Amino acid sequence: MKPALRLPLTCELPQRRSLRHYIVGQPADAQQAIDRLHLLHYAERFEWTRALDLPQNGIVINALYPGEVLRYLRRDVRA
């Protein structure tokens, strides 16, 4: 009996790139933008970070108005 031919198991994953979205604004405005993207079936609401308060001196992004927050979403995009 002839031994079975074994093919190497290879699994090539498609190349992926990262796309990052930042929303900076008043909490209600940021939530409204997230809700609109959800209605367009672009991103689920739960995929976004919770609202992060921006300090007065900013992080890398400076708050233009007091009380602004930052919301962030990272998505993988196929190459």
Image: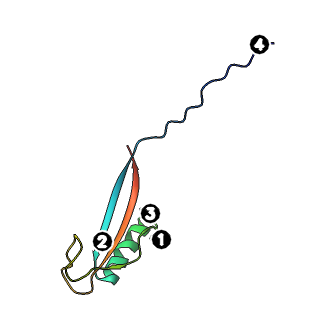
Q: In which quarter of the image is residue 52?
A: bottom left
Say which mark, if any, is on residue 2. Answer: 4
Q: Mark 1 points at which residue?
A: 46
How far apart marks 1 and 3 lie (CA) works out to 13 Å
Q: Name the residue under label 2.
A: 23
* Lower sequence index among marks 2 and 1: 2
How far apart marks 1 and 4 lie (CA) works out to 55 Å
Under mark 2, the amino acid is Ile
Which of label 1 and label 4 is nearer to you? 4
* Lower sequence index among marks 3 and 2: 2
Under mark 1, the amino acid is Phe
How far apart marks 3 and 4 lie (CA) works out to 54 Å
- Badge 4 crowding class, 10 Å Cα cut-off, few under 14, some 14 to 19, many 20 or more, is few
At x 37%, y 43%, the residue is 79
The foreground one among 41 and 10 is: 10
Q: Name the residue under label 3.
A: 41
Under mark 4, the amino acid is Lys
